[in-house]
Image (cartoon, helix red, strand yellow):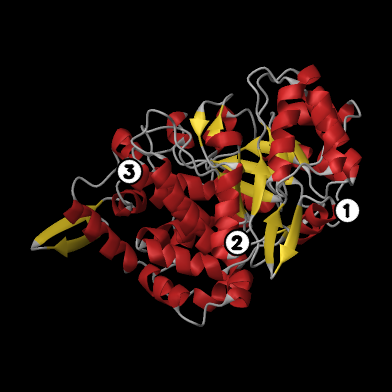
């Protein structure tokens, strides 16, 4: 017998379980069709959204989408729930929660206090019944501020991860990309490399190189090499300087196992990073990446829709007080997010849900070359996320990652977003840009020099 039902246009649609209701209520995307959990038509989707809107928020505390006994992510979600924080909205349905979030009552202070009282499933549910403008409006109310060597997430600021990837990890090629990015004001979120090889020797070389650049030019930023957390721990054991501890994460125990991790391993990495005490302003040092479809691609989604799985990953991230969380939204491919419309919607959902749960969210605004998307779609998502108050985006030479072979945002895109929306780099980083002669501030606007500052001429000569 169906547990949930709703009529639309004279037809009654029935949903057998909470996970079925959540999946059918999701806006259309190719991954849910691939998994066989999507609504069969628009009428069923609307009926599911209406039934979901009538569901009390407390229902999510009484029914686990993945069993508590078999999944450590579920256990983390339930065991860490803050009932006192939840009390403010505990009387609401999902639909009532949406209305409250859009009201003046839900201001920045109130939403910050509420975050520990929300489960990922509550956030995912309310996002499914929100329009694009709703996702933007609520997210821009929320600021999640973190610190390591600079301050991320302040209102009126937008940071970038300078991503100088190289297909052979060539130091000269990486250094050239870093110099290019610095001259466009990129890199305040981090200097972050995806290594072409995961060998410990190569990882250590890259970490030492990034640290040398940061120390030589006294850059108030942080470095990260995106290797497996256990490799980073080994680098620390070898005495190599490491700022941010990276790991890809997902929303189920089985999906995380496919990455070779569990909560204990993440804790070990977190503790190892803390032991170095390399942050000068704070010790938020974990850097997590996520993406809709990762659990499905590992056959570890337990019949859940991919957006709900994605949001459950944010419970894992939240536990470790991260410096930044990055939704790599279009990277997995069109099997999961087919076109620009689906990528845009997913990016806004991820940002909204992460911020609502108290996370410092960024987004790799990207697509693969075989997706039905183009740079116009990315410009739209970049602008929407900029308005929504995203903490950081990617900065890559020419938008084209020559190692990972996908399309994302460029150094110039960051300039566009900052200039058009009146946003600035992290305050400590902006001061460095001005001190180094890379930029100057005129009438409140940051203007970049059209010549190479003297301090970098020697570096350019060495690269040549």
Number of numbered tags placed on the structure image? 3
Secondary-structure class at tag 1 = loop
Tell me if mark 1 has few (under 14), some (14-19) or many (20+) residues whose alpha carbon lies within 10 angstroms of its own. Answer: few
- For disc 3, the marked residue is 29
Q: Is residue 53 left or right of residue 366?
A: left
Distance Cα–Cα, label 2 vs label 3: 30 Å
Marks 1 and 2: which is nearer the front?
1
- For disc 1, the marked residue is 280
**Up/down of 11 relative to 278, above or below:** below
Where, by quadrant of the figure, is residue 117 drawn?
A: bottom right
Q: Earlier in the sequence, mark 2 or mark 3?
A: 3
Distance Cα–Cα, label 1 vs label 2: 31 Å
The answer to whether any part of residue 1 appears in the image is: no
In the rendering, at what x and y percent does residue 313 appear?
55, 46
- For disc 2, the marked residue is 81
Marks 2 and 3: which is nearer the front?
3
Q: Earlier in the sequence, mark 1 or mark 2?
A: 2
Distance Cα–Cα, label 1 vs label 3: 43 Å
Say if mark 1 contacts mark 3, CB within 8 Å.
no
Secondary-structure class at tag 3 = loop
In the rendering, at what x and y percent does residue 410 appear?
57, 41
Tell me if mark 3 has few (under 14), some (14-19) or many (20+) residues whose alpha carbon lies within 10 angstroms of its own. Answer: many
């Amino acid at each position: 017998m169906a547990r949930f039902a709703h009529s639309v246009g004279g037809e009654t649609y029935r949903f057998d379980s909470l996970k079925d209701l959540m999946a059918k209520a999701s806006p259309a995307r190719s991954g849910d069709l691939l998994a066989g959990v999507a609504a069969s038509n628009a009428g069923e989707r609307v009926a599911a959204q209406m039934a979901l809107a009538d569901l009390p928020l407390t229902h999510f505390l009484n029914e686990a989408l993945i069993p508590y006994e078999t999944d450590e992510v579920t256990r983390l979600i339930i065991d860490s729930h803050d009932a006192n924080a939840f009390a403010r909205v505990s009387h609401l349905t999902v639909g009532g929660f949406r209305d409250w979030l859009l009201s003046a009552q839900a201001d920045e202070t109130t939403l910050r206090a509420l975050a520990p009282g929300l489960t990922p499933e509550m956030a995912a549910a309310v996002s499914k019944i929100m329009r694009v403008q709703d996702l933007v409006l609520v997210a821009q109310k929320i600021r999640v501020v973190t610190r390591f060597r600079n301050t991320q997430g302040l209102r009126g600021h937008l940071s970038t991860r300078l991503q100088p990837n190289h297909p052979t990890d060539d130091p000269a090629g990486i250094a050239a990309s870093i110099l290019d990015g610095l001259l466009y004001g990129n890199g305040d979120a981090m200097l972050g490399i995806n290594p072409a090889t995961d060998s410990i020797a190569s990882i250590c070389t890259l970490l030492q190189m990034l640290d040398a650049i940061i120390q030589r030019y006294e850059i108030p930023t942080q470095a990260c090499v995106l290797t497996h957390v256990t490799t980073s721990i080994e680098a620390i054991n070898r005495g190599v300087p490491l700022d941010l501890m990276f790991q890809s994460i997902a929303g189920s125990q089985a999906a995380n196992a496919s990455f070779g991790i569990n909560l204990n391993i993440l804790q070990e990495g977190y503790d190892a990073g803390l032991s170095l005490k390399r942050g000068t302003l704070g010790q938020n040092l974990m850097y997590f990446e996520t993406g809709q479809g990762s659990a499905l691609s590992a056959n570890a989604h337990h019949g859940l829709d991919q957006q709900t799985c994605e949001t459950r990953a944010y419970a894992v991230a939240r536990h470790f007080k991260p410096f930044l969380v990055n939704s790599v939204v279009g990277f997995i491919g069109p099997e999961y997010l087919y076109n620009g419309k689906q990528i845009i919607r997913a990016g806004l959902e991820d940002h909204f849900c992460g911020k609502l749960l108290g996370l410092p969210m960024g987004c790799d605004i990207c697509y693969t070359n075989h997706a039905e998307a183009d740079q116009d779609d990315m410009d739209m998502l970049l602008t929407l996320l900029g308005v929504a108050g995203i903490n950081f985006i990617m900065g890559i030479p020419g938008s084209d990652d020559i190692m990972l072979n996908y399309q994302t945002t460029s150094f110039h895109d960051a300039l566009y977003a900052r200039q058009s929306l009146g946003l600035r780099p992290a305050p400590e980083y902006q001061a460095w840009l001005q001190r180094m002669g890379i930029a100057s501030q005129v009438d409140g606007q940051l203007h970049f020099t059209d010549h190479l500052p003297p301090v970098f001429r020697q570096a350019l000569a060495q690269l040549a």
